[in-house]
Amino acid sequence: MTVHENGMINVAPHPRLLGVLGDIEFQPWQCLAELIDNGLDEFLRHPEASDETPTVGITLPARTSTPRAGEVWVRDNGPGMTLEQLNNALRAGWTSNARYGRLGLFGVGFNIATARLGRVAQVRTARREDPYWTSVTIDLRAMEAGGHFDLPVSEEPKTSPDEHGTDIVIRDLKPEHHDTLSRGQAKVKATLGDIYSYLLEHRDIRIVVDGEAIKPRRACVWDKSRFVVRSGERIPAVIDINEKLADRAACQDCGLWQDPDVRKCEQCGSERVEVRERRIWGWLGIQRYLHKSDYGIDFIRNGRKILIRDVQLFNWIDPDDPSGRGEQEYPIEVPGTGRIVGEIHIDHVQVNYQKNAFEYDTPEWKKVVHVLRGRGPLRPKIAKELNYKTNTSPLARLFNGYRRNDPGLNYLIPADDKRAIHEKAKEWADLFRKGVAEYQTDEKWYEAAKQFDEPKSAPPSPSPTDEPGDILAKKGLLPPKTTDPSRAIPPQAQPPRLETEDDRRARWRASGVRMPDMEAKYGLPGHGAALNVTVWLIHGHQLSSVNSPERLPVYVGAGRGSQVEVFVDGDHPVFVDFAVDTRDLIVMELGEYIRVRDNSDQNLSALFYEIKKRCLPDHKITGAFIRENASRLLSRVREAMLPVIAGNATGYWSYIDVEGQDAAQRTFAVEGGSDSWQDALETGEWISYVPASALARLLQHKPEAFMDGNVFKSGFIGLTDQIARKLAADRIVGFVADVAVLAERGTRRSPEELQRGRLSCYLLEQELSPAVEALE
């Protein structure tokens, strides 16, 4: 590392960079994934080293931002870096990562990811024991103009001694990537949830995008107990794969596998050679629905998907065909519609620099192909014609068992009593992925397939002499026709249908709203599997358990596996009369649920604290958490105010006091923004630089401009009474002022004031208009 005496570091590119830059083209989500990989690597290498839930948080630019003003933030709560480690991380082409066992690989990920997204990147890092944050800003234009790679290093004070991790802020975004990220947040979230689905579901990590915890994309496959029979062979709907290969020595520099007794790489001469396990494991199976593109095999390396729903193993390439084009073998019964899926882990196979393909010419990949689909064709007749033995590979068994899409149990195809119901099966899959309880098992699909094989008996045809009234009477819907009123038989009273547990929960959900900030994986060391919790806030219904009519403020109901649903009665007196914190009571009930499930005698209040600390770190009201939450909320308010202010920027500026105006100019001078301060005054961008307290002042002076749905939901113009108007405005002004105090001096308040501020954040967020919420 080169660290100059004048407080500069040198980040000149490493020669390794020259061979790869021309081959790398990253999509925006790939850039984010590279930065996520870097944030997760230390967690995955040393899971026992952290007492917090490993979290990577991403903030995308708002839809109303411009590329110049838009920013991408990537933050993790990892161990942080020393100055030497930071210098190496910024030095393009340098890497300490081994070729195997790490998500990050080539030492270009950070540089390419940040440079592809924007022209300026700030990296800030700190270890827990460091007294300050170490910060470096990379401005590509300035470096190119200056012709050097020396970057100034600054030290920023911590707001709390325990702060640690790495923050990356990418500014001056490239227009094409800014548009993708600012307008396609939902797609970015879905893609990351797909890429990291294994880690999110099976490892205790969190990825949060714009405040929303990313949910893993789960495979909607038939249960392992389901099967079909072909030629006397039972073929299960899911086949487990676990092929242990011989251990070999891997070069951690060039990636070459070689004999386990070598001490020096035969290809590059490196002495970084390690004997490592090699294994092909996972599963192949049958999806519960057909789709034109949503099928294929996911190939996973170190927990991250490299290939997503890949179909290349469905093609047969005849080694004797000189063209090498290959022929599609699946799907063939219904062209373009398939349902064979899988998740295969191959940590020992090399990937390319973009991490979107494996090195297909290596013996390791060819072994994977052989294990999964065999050497010959999947189709028995073609195999016989080409003198291949019968293919008994896992993929061939699934192909021969499920290649047809005939309705019924014979091929596990859902249907009604006449035909297959492919579209309905896909709709059910959507409900499965949304977490709806009754769709988590395959019972819906199975019963539908069974219905086709065992249709209900048709009612007898009415005789020509029957009249409609007679038919209804026979069904018990009308009394039979009689000429003697005294002989009329009253209809039999039908007993009321008892409400099931599923019925109760469905009724509660229908009148509830989700509480996403409480939905997470709740897992503690020594307490078994983590709970996947969904939370509903209910109004208009009283909650109670099946065994008691007692009204409950919080009801915790178990689902399939580790799924848990929590329902909160928002009208319960404990919240209305005593203002008990809803979220605290949820955590307390989850703690009791874990105690009962694990038959634990751990103190409930101690368990409450552990859940708060490990599973809900963003709920802290000390340190940077509450200050950052308040700042993010006020950022949304500023963004929403800008279109209003732009209509008369100079006029609104006049409502800012002299002290606030001076502070805004100083902030502008430090952070930059428009080409000139005059531009900021004319466009209204000055709203981004005024102190937080100035937002309350603006609202106090011009409530009619920002209320009535423009920024805040509450009405103002429609009120004719001046006192009522003042009360309506003062209520919102009070929330904004409280949040402003947190944003500017969040860590200097008493616990009671911090509690009040946290509630003000919540209440202010509830007051934002739907237009503002749509910016998220």
Image (tube, rainbow, N blue to C red):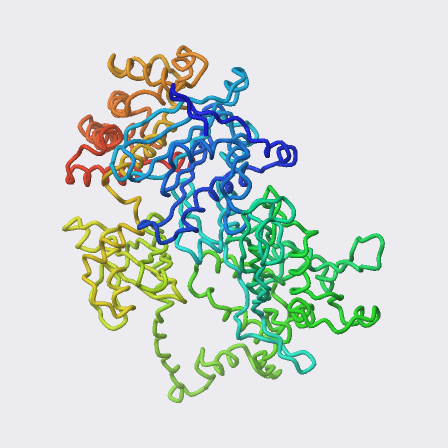
In front of the other: 185 or 415: 185
Q: Where is residue 424 drawn, in percent x and y?
A: 56, 62
Give the image location of residue 333, x and y in percent.
73, 65
Q: Residue 410 is drawn in which quadrant?
A: bottom right
Compare residues 272 and 513 and report the one nearer the observer. 272
Q: Is residue 717 above or below residue 575?
A: above
Q: Position of residue 590 (x, y in %)?
A: 27, 60
Q: Nearer the viewer, residue 273 or 452?
A: 273
Q: How many marks?
A: 0
x 62%, y 75%: residue: 235
Q: Is residue 727 left or right of residue 16?
A: left
Quadrant location, the N terminus: top left
Along the line of sight, the residue nearer the viewer: 497 or 183: 183
Task: Indicate the position of residue 372 as horizontal and vertical percent values.
Answer: 65, 64
Q: Is residue 576 above or below residue 389?
A: above
Above or below, 336 relative to 673: below
Residue lying farthest to the top in this orientation: 678
Q: Quadrant of residue 419?
A: bottom right
Q: Is residue 231 left or right of residue 425?
A: right
Direction from residue 382 to residue 373 in the image, left or right: left
